[in-house]
Image (cartoon, rainbow, N blue to C red):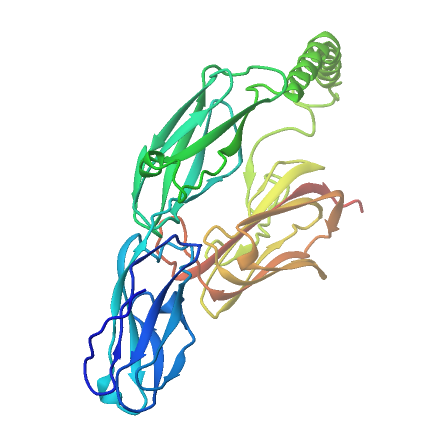
Amino acid sequence: MTPSAASSGPGAPGLDIAAVTVTPGGTASTSLTVRNDSDIVEAYTLEAVGDCAAWTTVEPARVSLYPGTSETVTIRLAPPRSPEVRAGDVPLGVRVLPAEHPESVTVPETTVHIEPFHELRTEILPRRRRGWLRGRYRLAVRNEGNTPAQVSFAPEQAGEELKFGFIPAELALEPGESAETSLRVRTGKPVWFGKPVVWPFTVQATDAVAQEDAEGPGALVRPPLEAEFVQIPVFPKWLLALLAALLALILAWFALVRPAVRSAAKQAANEVVQPRPTPGGGQNGQSPGTGSGKGTGAQQGGQGANPSGTGGDNPGGTVSGTGAGQQSSTTIDVQTSGGGDKTGTYVVPKGKIFGITDIVVANFQGDEGVMTITFGDRKITTIALETFRNQDYHWVTPIKIPEDATVTMNVTCAKPGTPATGRQATQCHEVLNVSGVLNDVTR
């Protein structure tokens, strides 16, 4: 280049820089001639300044000149292929600093023309979708060029069995900007039975600005994105096999199992309802072991005494039935306040033996505390009240209690519960029902 004859002060060199064009990702160079117009030997330090300084070097970066001499230095530009290097004209300056006369520093400037380039980075997620009729995908797009991009999408599928929809259909992206669009894929008709059908397709992301400059050195065309939609059948094979097996089981039930079950049930019912022999010796058409009546603590008409059970606010149990070897039951009712202890008893009548086969315990309020049940001298069980509301016990072999012995229920009330009314009770309230057979004592 031709040096300038001008001088800007004592020791100032004559400078001039030609304009330069560079493509991001490539290199370019220009030159600068430094001339010493002073009357002393001078050293000059050269440094690139401005927006291009990060990717601009000066070689050599320092020169020493005698008066009236000059030297040409090379300015190399190597901009990276990055969205940060925007296309257009960018000023370039080189600061020339004299060592002896630093006040005569100069910054010659020129213009660097950065050529545009177009590049899109695209990705489709997921690569494969499964569904009966439709599938959804995400398309991520990033503009890695150095100019704005107007991105549109073009799907392609052999046979055209699929329909495509993009939301949004176009994206406007600045250099370095990213965005996403939603892709919906739909088939025309379902697959009812059989194997899944695989529909491969491609999506090409295009930049309208890049298409205008498709033959230019800055255009980069990437291959289209590949994806698949796997259409699964509505009714898989295993479902058909299951339906066939269920149908076979239903037919077997109605044809074989159900008649056999009904026959066995009918036979069992006939055996249960067979008439039983009626023992003789009864009066007025009644057997000796039948009758009705209600006694208090003893069989009605059996004893003159009334050895009744006592318990809480309901003294005495009730024994029903008359005659030897008859079913009888008694109820012991105990009520006691919180922190209290109370016992309810039933006394087996004179001349009787009570064979107990069943007891039912009721804690209908949900009280808290301890209940102990004793037959004569034998402790049957101790139960925490908070563990039950109603509980029953049964024995195949009756537990026999002799005459004058007692059935005892002892209740220790820790805390009254809350009955169905929803209001906490003031007292614990437990009920024991004892059932069995009351037999005469054989003397």
Q: Position of residue 439 (x, y in %)?
A: 72, 42
Query: As drawn, is 394 to the left or to the right of 433?
Result: right
Q: Is residue 409 above or below residue 14?
A: above
Task: Decide: is 137 above or below 134.
Answer: below
Quadrant the N terminus occupies:
bottom left
In x, y percent, where is residue 401?
72, 52
**Residue 284 in view here:** no
Residue 442 is at least partly visible in this image: yes
The image quadrant that residue 318 belongs to is: top right
**Which quadrant of the figure has residue 118?**
top left
Query: In percent of the image, x 33 and y 65: which residue is there?
Result: 52
**In the displayed image of the protein, which residue is found farthest to the front?**
68
Image location (x, y in percent) of residue 100: 30, 92
The mark total stands at 0
Residue sticking out furthest to the top: 255
Q: Residue lying furthest right in this view?
A: 443
- Is 202 placed left or right of 208 in the picture? right
Q: Residue, x 39% and y 58% (percent of image)?
A: 425
User: In this orientation, which residue lies closer to the viewer: 10 or 356?
Assistant: 10
Residue located at (44% from left, 23% from top):
186
- The quarter of the picture where residue 164 lies is top left
Could you tell me which residue is drawn at 58 percent across and 31 percent down?
Answer: 292
Foreground of the two, 205 or 401:
205
How far from the left and from the top, in percent, is residue 359?
A: 63, 47
Q: Nearer the viewer, residue 401 or 221?
A: 221
